[in-house]
Image: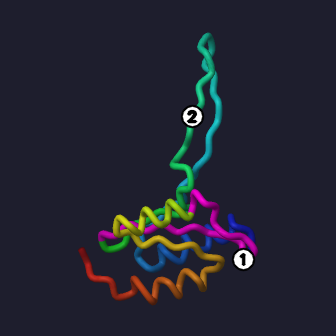
Amino acid sequence: MSETALVKACLVWLRLHGVMAWRQNTGAMTVQARGQRSRFIRFGMVGASDIFGVFRGRFLAVECKRPSNTPTWAQEQFLQEARDHGAWAVWVTSVEDLERFWNKELADAPTH
């Protein structure tokens, strides 16, 4: 399964479980308006997870990877900082990974 397909499947799974979840795009580009010099614009934070969400008052970050891949240093740092601030932040290689983490940590989470 491609990472794009995994992100889509995880979004469906999260939404079916009551999570307000969305794809968080990141990247950068140079733009130039007519008659002006070019500007570099960054979209999102470096290392930000593929999926952001909110469930029962708690922020969620989910990084999706193909089974043969692992998060980059920046992605690991983002996940750790999110956890340090009380978020539920994980990286997964399948919807089954997501479900396993969910059942372990969030299925019975209290409402905030």
- Above or below — where is 67 with respect to 52? below
- Magenta stretch containing residue 7, yes or no? no
First in residue order: circle 1 vs circle 2 = 2
Q: Are marks 1 and 2 in contact (CB under 8 Å)?
A: no
Instruction: Say whether residue 109 is left or right of residue 73.
Output: left
- Above or below — where is 22 with respect to 90? above
Q: CA distance from mark 1 to mark 2?
A: 31 Å
Seen at 72% across and 77% down, the residue is: 67
**Camera-side residue: 52 or 76?**
76
Q: Quadrant of residue 23?
A: bottom right
Q: Amino acid at mark 1?
A: Pro
- Magenta stretch containing residue 58, yes or no? yes
State the SS at label 2: strand
Quickly name the residue at label 1.
67
Q: What span is in magenta?
A: 57-75
**Camera-side residue: 16 or 21?**
21
- Above or below — where is 91 with respect to 73? below
**Camera-side residue: 81 or 97?**
81
Image location of residue 100, percent across then percent down: 53, 88
**Camera-side residue: 88 or 5?**
88
State the SS at label 1: loop
Q: Quadrant of residue 66?
A: bottom right
**Structure colour scheme:** rainbow
Where, quadrant-wise, is the C terminus in this rendering?
bottom left
Seen at 43% across and 62% down, the residue is: 81
Q: Amino acid at mark 2?
A: Ile
Quickly name the residue at label 2.
41
Image location of residue 92, percent across then percent down: 60, 76
